[in-house]
Image (cartoon, rainbow, N blue to C red):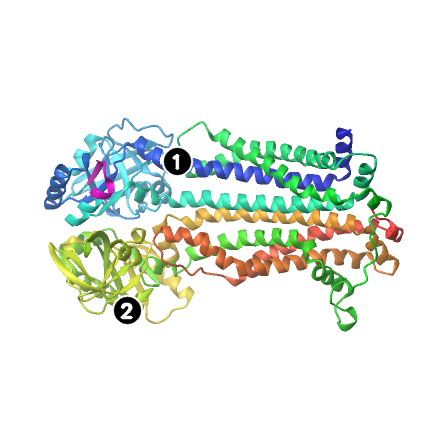
Amino acid sequence: MYFSILSKDLKRKKTMNIILLIFIILAATFISSSMNNLIVITKAMDNYFEKAGLGDFIILTINEEDNDRAITEFLNEHNQVNSWIRDENIFLTRENFKLADDKEFTLSSVAFVSSYRIKQQKFFGSNNKEITKIEDGQIYLPLKLMEQNNLKSGDSITIINGDVSLDFTILGNCKDCLLGSTMMGSDRLIISDHDYEKLKADQGTSFGSIYSVKTNNLKELEKSFNQMGVNVLVSCDKSLISMTYIMDMIMAAMLLVVSVCLILISFVILRFTIVFTLNEEFRQIGIMKAIGINNRKIRGLYITKYFAISVVGAVLGFLLSIPFGGMFLKQVSRNIILSNTGSALFINLLCSALIVVIVLLFCYLCTRQVNKYSPIDAIKNGSNGERYKRKGFLRLSTGRIPAFFFLALNDILSGLKRFSALIITFTLGILLIILPVNTINTLRSDSMVKLFGMTVSDVYMVNENNLSNFRQKGRDYVMEYLKAMESDFAAKGMPATVTCETMFNYKITYQDSTFISLAEQGTNITADQYDYTRGQAPKFANEVALTHITAESIGADIGDTVTIKIGGTEQEFVVTAIFQTMNNLGKGIRFSEKAVLDYAEAIGTSAVQVTYLDQPTLQDKEKRMEDIVKLFPEYKVYNAKDYISREMGNVAGQLEGIKQIIVAVIIIINLLVAVLMEKIFITKEKGEIGMLKSIGFSNAAIVMWQASRIGIILFISTLLGALLSKPLALISTAKCFEMMGADHIDFVIKPFEVYFMYPVIIFSTTVIASVLTALQTRKITAQETNNIE
């Protein structure tokens, strides 16, 4: 009997059941794949580091004998050090590389060249196998460097270091757990031992060291090392290195959020469908009770139906989640090694089974309404008396709106609960589009430069050789260099100010707390031109500003006096302001332009920033970019958007792909929901439609009435989505920026795109689907007025 009833019901409500099945398939696909991906990626970093043999604490230095001697003594004497390894590498810049056909070589920053047989860690090829052999004349490049230069396996590259020139054949890309993240500023290339010895033979070679330390007490070791105050490029633990892969985690997390929203939408639709089905079938339920079938068996009938749909949906979703999840894992595994734990299928299967269990529980709760029906309902045809109050508060006689629009608006206002499923579904869909769009627009905006502790300029110019020159010749040379560039710009009819920041790594102490932080000083620019979240810019030589992370790490605040070790001497500074930066994951100190620093200790420089004084048009700026490339061929020239993309590893581009998938999914969901709801409304309102036709309403007017309700609900949902997007962004995507060091973020909102373009796309496709579905009302005649079904 159950099978017969279920078979007839599935055939009779074919469209409704198919749409519900599609929702369950989507939910199972997304939740299974995204949950599995998140678990795999979360575990992958620890597994990757362990497989590569990365130490607990990493120190990178510019090869200076005094510093290396101090670090060596510290590591040999410290009780918390179990073992340590030191490896040497060569620093090279863009000018040291030459491609075939004299193509320009693109390099993000300084490149590390190492032997593949270093002891600090292992390297892996694109096939995830350890690189155990490299012949002379062969080289591995990081993937990001190959993509930037459009290189592939088999291509040639020449490295020139002084009088030494070596030709290499590219074997492929290597996976480097320490420097392989797209957010890492430096790249590492690996070659054979023999070729490495040839390259380092030149007397002018710049060397560096990487120390990999195994420890039994990381916190104590870091504290002791910070107190020593040795000038290094970077000192960090594995957790900080793991943070550089955060964008891979964010993409998995975004998919998980989409999955959760899909489940919520599925359950909203499921509840609406169950309640509608029960309300429509009150006669059948009453008759079943009249012939002796109890509530439990009647509820079991409906639960069995949705159990069958959920099982089919979960199975199909499970099968689809395997290639769908693999597609995203393939993107993530370009930079890291994803260990095959063997639990992937189990996780997908578990999530799919969980969908079935949740659907059953949900059905059990929703079918409690069966207990309220009685045989008398069937006898009375569901009528419990007439309604003697007005429906809604709108009056057609007092307005001039079309009748079909009045009916649609009055239906919504007088029965908002009835349309709640649509409002929730459309609002979630709008939010899923607005949040990533606002995030991508923020990442691509000029204001992102401020989140890296810099000022907004017209042009950003990068030259890897600047660091070496600044270190050797000091700040007076930096000032003269920038002034000379200003003269060159003015001579070409481009009056501008030219500024640059120089970076240091300094020990900062407050009371008993010590911290090693990145420090910056601008040249040809005053400190008050930067943004601060609290306080006033450092004005005098003995004043500094701290990032909130640096300040919290040592327990200092505005007005406190901190001690900073500069050039081997301890100097006191007053904290006058707090600022934010995502550079170096939020660690930062900003000195006044009047502070006297030892530029021989510099560890890096920011881009040379050019700010025009004559306010050229956008077209003029584009033309000037071409002129600047010719005027300064030793520089890579960027606008603000491209410079930030370079610094963050094209995060916005990666999110753009996810956004396109989300938009496509939301459009499909809205189409399905619109079709489902419209069919339900038409089925339920056959009597009303017949009555409207009997009093003269045309088919077109009835179709517009039906579609207008969907349109009005979509408009309301868009407004709700816009209102909720900012607070939800602060507790979702903003947290990702905070993990990277930002204290707070103001999202860039493009009204045309967010409040017009995407809503119009969704509105038009959804309303068209509603209109096409509502066309079936033409088959309903005036004779349906007295037909309950």
Residue tagged by mark 1?
A: 43
Q: Is residue 634 visible?
A: no
Bounds of the magenta span?
210-221
For residue 291, side relative to residue 597 (left or right): right
Q: Does dot 1 land on a helix, a strand or a loop?
A: helix
Residue 615 placed where, x, y %? 37, 70
Quarter of the image with the N terminus is top right
Task: First in sequence, mark 2 or 1: give its number.
Answer: 1
* Amino acid marked by disc 1: Lys
Is residue 218 in the magenta section? yes
For residue 771, side relative to residue 593 (left or right): right
Q: Measuring 15% from the left and 60% from the top, which residue is drawn there? A: 597
* Amino acid marked by disc 2: Gln
Is residue 42 in the magenta section? no
Q: Measuring 76% from the left and 73% from the top, which residue is drawn there? A: 398
Residue 18 placed where, x, y %? 69, 39
For residue 371, side relative to residue 184 (left or right): right
Q: Measuring 73% from the left and 67% from the top, which residue is drawn there? A: 393
Give the quadrant of residue 300: top right
Which label number is shown at residue 272?
A: none
Give the quadrant of residue 281: top right
At label 1, counting other C-alpha atoms closer than 10 Å, the crowd grade (few under 14, some 14-19, many 20 or more) is some
Residue 596 placed where, x, y %? 15, 63
Which label number is shown at residue 536?
A: 2
Q: Measuring 15% from the left and 39% from the top, which residue is drawn there? A: 78
Q: Is residue 761 above or below residue 290?
A: below
Q: Is residue 415 above or below residue 322?
A: below
Residue 548 placed where, x, y %? 30, 58
